[in-house]
Amino acid sequence: MRKNILLLSLVLAVSTACTTADPKESAVSLHPMADLNQNLQETEAEDPYWTTYEVFLYSYYDTNGDGIGDINGLTEKLDYISDMGFNAIWMMPIHPSPSYHKYDVMDYKAIDPVYGTMEDFEKLEEACEEKGIRLIMDLVLNHTSSQHPWFLEAVDALRNNYESKYINYYRFSDSAQDGYAQIPDTGIYYEARFWEGMPDLNLDSPDVRNEILDIVSFWKEKGIDGFRLDAVTSYYTGRDSENIAFLQWLKENTDTYYVAEAWTNQETYASYYASGLDSFFDFAFGDQKGVISGTVSGSYGADDYISAQIKEQQLFSSYNTNAVNAPFYTNHDMARGAGYYAGDDGSKTKMALGLNLLMSGNAFLYYGDELGMKGSGKDENKRAPMYWSDGGEGMCKGPEDMDEVNMKFPSLEEQEKDEYSIYQYVKQAVHIRNAFKEIMQGEVEEIPSLMNEEAAAYVKKYGDSSVLIAINTADQTEELDLSGTGYGNLAAMLIVNDQPVVLKDGKITLPPYAIAVVQP
């Protein structure tokens, strides 16, 4: 059996969208995927049902020759991102910081000099607006850098016994506690759950909360469209109800979009939707042990992928009927997906990316996943330089302590020339997503007669419109009988080689790892 009984505890959420594609009975050509999909007419995404591209600036594109990616590099690559079909970008932290990852912020209202200037950021924002690309930035509220002026003054005040409002910005103690670090040469300790260089903020402090409101307002005035919230389960460690209450306060006092990282089990992060926050990353589906990878590798069946989406959309809506899921496959904290499948020729990597982009909500893709980049082990390896070419213009050196990462699949320069590369597949997948509001925003419904382990079909509904999606997770051709379903027009396909999807006489033939979108 391919099913994993643990899946029964998982819950999922997905949505849908619609298109004006010219239907075809079948597609047979030299390039059947592109040949069929070119008929699709893209529709404008409703906020915040975006397709979002996650970027680590440090490793993305270098324009000044120092080997470090920068804001101008992102601006220069907006055409590339837009051409793939992404309509939103999530930038990992860009504030001054002593680290390469920059999750230890020294100034929330400034740009790290290695990335550029505020003027560079303003040009980026203006360019994004012109292209209709939303810009989301990381907002790290659990902690600051130990070099932040707030913390430095608080420590100085404690050392020299004078009053300072900044003492209350953090959590200090006269005794050692779990999760606390010691101020050297004193008997004073401070909460630092991640490491001593990241002192935790006291989010109960009215002054800290006012600072947060001011920071959000500052960046909104700069044109930021939303924020990714880091480590929200650590705001009040082990106290979910207090975390939820803080997020509710944040949402009620600011008018902006938030997507939050609550890296915990699905039952728990689903409960965080009670805060009224817009989106939470769907960890049950991401990573090597998630539903997407499990479906592609065979740990779960195709029917399990469908059932999990139905379960989670019910779960999320039970806490917030306006919940917008944030599905993803990998991110900067996880090993990249191209290393999940031994002996994969790219077929499994492609399908996993396709399954992610079929999910409803604000779907995220980590930079370089569109090329099948590799990276595992230490964090630095997971943030390797974007593989534009083999040593060409704009290539970054990557974080200082990164191991040598040998890529499995070619660079963008090579993949652009290959009709069946991972890059071309992802472009097609995003194009399909953008053409169907049923895919972007719809609700998933199963078709009981077509819930099979290797190949299965389901419906995604948005308003009065719907599409059927058929998937084959097997390494062999499978057939499904769609007669009687009311869906008979092949509108789009994702295939991993030159074998096309064929729909004829009510039966759909799906080559290995194929996905098809069928309209009534």
Image (cartoon, rainbow, N blue to C red):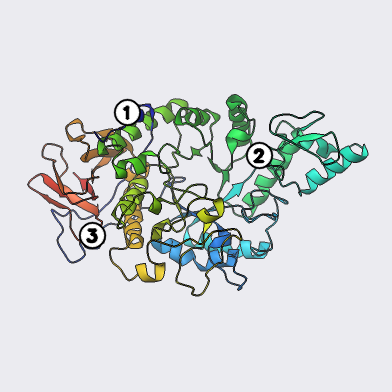
Sequence-first disc among 3 and 1? 1
Q: Which residue is mark 1?
A: 5
Classify residue 300 as left or right of residue 413: left
Q: Amino acid at mark 3?
A: Asn
Q: Which residue is mark 3?
A: 497
Which is nearer the eye, 40 or 236?
Answer: 236
Task: Bin the neighbour count of mark 1 within 10 Å (Cα to Cα): few under 14, some 14-19, many 20 and up.
Answer: few
Is residue 438 in view from this perspective?
Answer: yes
Measured in 3D between alpha carbons, the distance from the residue under mark 1 to the one under mark 2, in whole angstroms, is: 36 Å
Sequence-first disc among 1 and 2? 1
Coordinates of residue 71 in the picture (x, y in percent): 59, 63
- Vertical side of 226 occupied by 425: above or below: below
Which residue is found at the position 53% from the left and 71% from the top?
Answer: 394
Measured in 3D between alpha carbons, the distance from the residue under mark 3 to the one under mark 1, in whole angstroms, is: 32 Å
Which is nearer the eye, 132 or 8?
Answer: 8
Q: Amino acid at mark 2?
A: Asn
Classify residue 486 as left or right of residue 182: left
- Looking at the rendering, which quadrant does residue 464 occupy? top left
Q: Nearer the viewer, mark 2 or mark 3?
A: 3
Coordinates of residue 49 in the picture (x, y in percent): 43, 45
